[in-house]
Amino acid sequence: MNIDWETVRAAVWRQHKGALRAVMSVDPVALDSLVGIEAQKTELCRNTERFLSRLPANNALLWGARGTGKSSLIKAVLNEYAAEGLRLIEVFKTDLYHLPDIVDEIRHLPFRFIVYCDDFSFDVNDNSYVALKTLLEGSIEQAPDNVLLYATSNRRHLVPESMQDNRDSHVVGDEVHYADAIEEKISLSDRFGLWLSFYPPTEDGYLVIVDSYFPNYPGDRQVLHKAAKDFARARGSKSGRTARQFFNAYSVDCFSNG
């Protein structure tokens, strides 16, 4: 794979080449730039610090609404701890079947690796997650102690459940016995020991994020807030992503008119 991990902090799997490509310009997002997700930051940093200290740590599933900082948090954690030996490999969902080969190449290296998979969810007829479950927990070969999986998803249970799945469940005594289909789907999520939930901010929370992008705004902040709310209303979304897009679209005009 020819990656010099001493100088490279991240790589991405390229299927057509069958190899990792070094990422030379990593998104510089920092932990303190992420506003409104303090509890999630604390939990993921604590888990990562345990991992770096060779203590037991969990695979992490960051799930919730789009644009709420899930992917940014993982990238920020890499930037925060890269100097301590943390490295990251991004693998797209469609390439997960390559994961065992990737892990074989890094399991004996002295670095600590986060395998990062964005938009980690599966369609009803997609069985690629079955092989992944073995890598996460169950196999004749022990999982490498220098690799964790951090994944983001809009779904908590990763695989959609059908109405028929629920009809096949039943109650025995005081216990619910889920249908085999539901058990199979839930078992994938259960292999993530750390679940972090992300929710859209309130309007006030959204404006706090907007203010973090405009710390030195010279004009009337009420005017800025009205423009930010109009921007979010036009997109039907109030989120950290929307706040960033508002900054990209309006920062030059705001300062030139301030």
Image (cartoon, grey):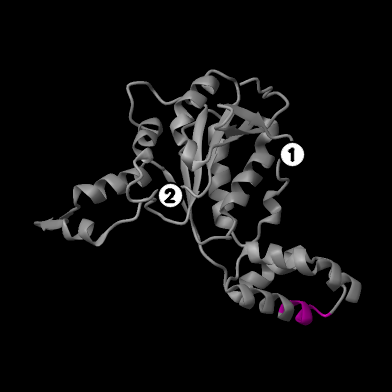
Task: Give the percent coordinates (x, y) of residue 92.
Answer: 52, 40
The stretch in magenta equals 220-225
Predominant SS along the magenta part:
helix
Provide the residue designation for mark 2.
121
Image quarter hosting the N terminus: top right
Location of residue 159 in the rendering, given as x and y in whole percent from the top left corner: 36, 51
Residue 14, relative to residue 200: is it above or below?
A: above
Q: Earlier in the sequence, mark 1 or mark 2?
A: 1
Question: Which residue is pictured at 55% across the width and 26% down the height?
Answer: 18
Residue 163, horizontal then vertical, whole percent: 24, 62
State the mark number for residue 181: none
Depth check: 32 or 255 in front?
Answer: 255
Residue 221: say if magenta. Answer: yes
Instruction: Decide if residue 163 is in sight here.
Output: yes
Q: Amino acid under label 2?
A: Ser
Residue at 50% over, 34% down: 148
Badge 1 amino acid: Ser
Relative to residue 101, is residue 199 depicted above or below? below
In which quarter of the view is residue 166 placed? bottom left
Q: Secondary structure at mark 2?
A: loop
128 sits to left or right of 216: left
Q: Residue furthest top?
A: 108
Q: Which residue is mark 1?
A: 25
Residue 9 is situated, as x and y percent measured from the top left of the image, at 68, 32
Whether residue 258 can be seen here? no
Which of the 4 image quarters holds residue 168?
Answer: bottom left
Q: Is residue 199 above or below residue 85?
A: below
Q: Residue at the spot x=61%, y=62% of the render? A: 36
Indicate left or right for 60 with 7 as reference: left
Q: Are marks 1 and 2 in contact (CB under 8 Å)?
A: no
